[in-house]
Amino acid sequence: MDNEGFRIPRRFLPRDAVEDELERLDQSIASATAEIERNRDRVAEQLGDQYGAIFAAHVSMLNDPGLRATLEEMIRLRHYSPEYSVSRVLRNYAKVFQSLEGPMPERANDIFDIEKRLLRHLLGRRREELGNIVSEVLVLAHNLTPSETSNLNPKFVRGFVTETGGPGSHTAIVAEALGIPAVVGIGPFLAEVSGGETVIIDGDQGLVILHPDEETIARYRYEVDQQRSQARKLEAFRDLPAETLDGVRIQLLGNIEFPYEVEQCKERGSDGIGLYRTEFLFLAGAEQPSEEEQFAAYSEVARAMGDQPVVMRTVDLGADKIPNLPAPEDEPNPFLGLRSIRLALKHRGLFRTQLRAMLRASVAGNIRMMFPLICTLMELRAAKSVLQDAKEDLDEEGVKFDRNMKVGMMVEVPSAVLMMDHFAHEVDFFSIGTNDLVQYALAVDRSNKDVAGLYTASDPSVLRLINMAVKIAHEHDVPIGMCGQMCGNPLYTMFLLGLGLRSLSVTPAAIPEIKRVCRSVELPQCEKVAKRALRFDNAHHVRTYLKEELSKVVPNIRI
Ligand code: PEP
Ligand code: MG
């Protein structure tokens, strides 16, 4: 897809369609030319003929007989679709300009402009509905939002790559949930590739290989086989508890975005759901889900898990998860703006409806409620007061709910860590969200590729914040766990157990691996590792050290 979302199919044409397709191509060239000429006239009228002349170059490129002949040859002799032919030929032209010295590479933008114009006329203005893809593809796009990603069907979309975004973004998290190999935020590359070409996406290493040779393809086929057999070996851990060698039981939970992931958690032997990101229900359709729809989804998850705990997080919308709500007028820093609990408190009706649905579902299983992105005590109290109102309403209506439902908060901003002794008096549990904690501790946008190198949970400041949080929670006897991506990475398991964490909630696919690490370590050894890791002064040394220690207990582990 180009950066306006047009999909460019290679599609082979039947022989008898060639004349019609050539006709379609000519019409698009004519319409695109007319469009440019209209622009030329408007500009010439307002600014003078010399400015209008800028467009003349575009008109003559579009109508270049050499270009037309090359396109015709691709359509007539190779039976490619006009869209693919236009994209392929013009991108090759652009590459020639890009390879020149001096100011010439900028002229490539003119060629891309012509390509886009032609594609718009060939394909219509509609952005491709990604949910409608019904044949196996790799999606190569400028950007995908988390909700677009959640609409991808893993049966057909076998991998995706985006130019923008970061590894901590929800687009990446959803890809993991769907089990789609992905590389997010790789930088500009779309000009190098057209539809129908062979591409390898290596999500583990963040690599995209365009036009791979036979040897590379064979190497990756082998790698895929290896991963499959590794996954089969890990299945053996399914029915074993996450227990350390010295007999300490670790609670290993799953993170889910969609109710159907419950099965994946169960298949992998989880102890429950440690984070249900309910906002994905709000991102799926054009309408907000009704109380009944939410009630049905929450009850389904709770029922499926039986006695096992299900931590339902209240809506965490905003920033990169754009809801169908009136947008804030001017939000230049969305991650510092009206997101998460702030947005919920602003849209009380929506929030209250969700709390009612969760309360009603609480009779179906073992539900706990959790508020996201709490930064101040007043916010927590405001959220709890909406909850109290919802409970009173249900009482008045005679509707049953679990009166003892535990209510907790996420610890994902430094202010929450610093004030935890106060929060400890007002919540039943804490859950550390490292995805946001990393971004707010280091002032690094989790979805910005240009600062992705700074976005790491290995930073000593992050390790210290987590250590502080665990200590304060323990001092006040309030249960604390972690649900950020950090704890799904085996690199950190020893460190986290060593700090005293006993509850980890990870993406379902990571459960067997983390279980394996838990079953390979002893706590005193982890405590030593944690103590030492806290003394390093940079992320690189932390990582190297943790890698070394991990490979001592689980040799050959892939990180
Ligand atoms: C987190 O911030 O660590 C977290 C678990 O929440 P999310 O990734 O949905 O922001
Ligand atoms: Mg978060």
Image: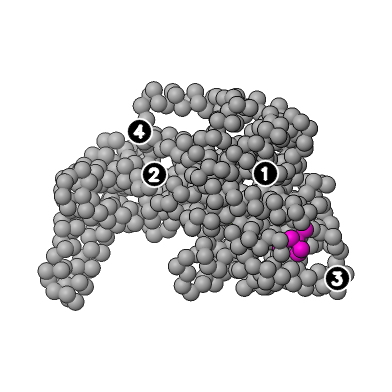
For residue 395, the mark is: 3
Q: CA distance from mark 3 to mark 1?
A: 42 Å
Q: Earlier in the sequence, mark 2 or mark 1?
A: 2
Neighbours of disc 1 within 10 Å: few (<14), some (14-19), many (20+): many
Report which residue position mark 4 lands on. Answer: 211
For residue 9, the mark is: 2
Viewer-nearest of discs 1 and 4? 1
Q: Secondary structure at mark 4?
A: loop
Q: Residue at x 16, y 72 (%)?
A: 44
Q: Earlier in the sequence, mark 2 or mark 4?
A: 2
Q: For residue 315, which quarter of the picture?
A: bottom right
Q: Are marks 3 and 1 in contact (CB under 8 Å)?
A: no
Residue lying farthest to the bottom in this orientation: 46
Type of amino acid under label 3: Asp
Q: Earlier in the sequence, mark 4 or mark 3?
A: 4
Type of amino acid under label 1: Leu
Q: Is the CB–ligand 1 distance for label 3 below 8 Å?
A: no
Q: CA distance from mark 2 to mark 4?
A: 17 Å
Q: Residue at x 34, y 56 (%)?
A: 120
Q: Is residue 17 visible?
A: no
Residue 20 position in % (x across, y down): 31, 48
Residue 264 position in % (x across, y down): 68, 40
Of residues 250 and 346, the one drawn nearer to the viewer in this rendering = 250
For residue 499, the mark is: 1
Main SS of the magenta part reads loop
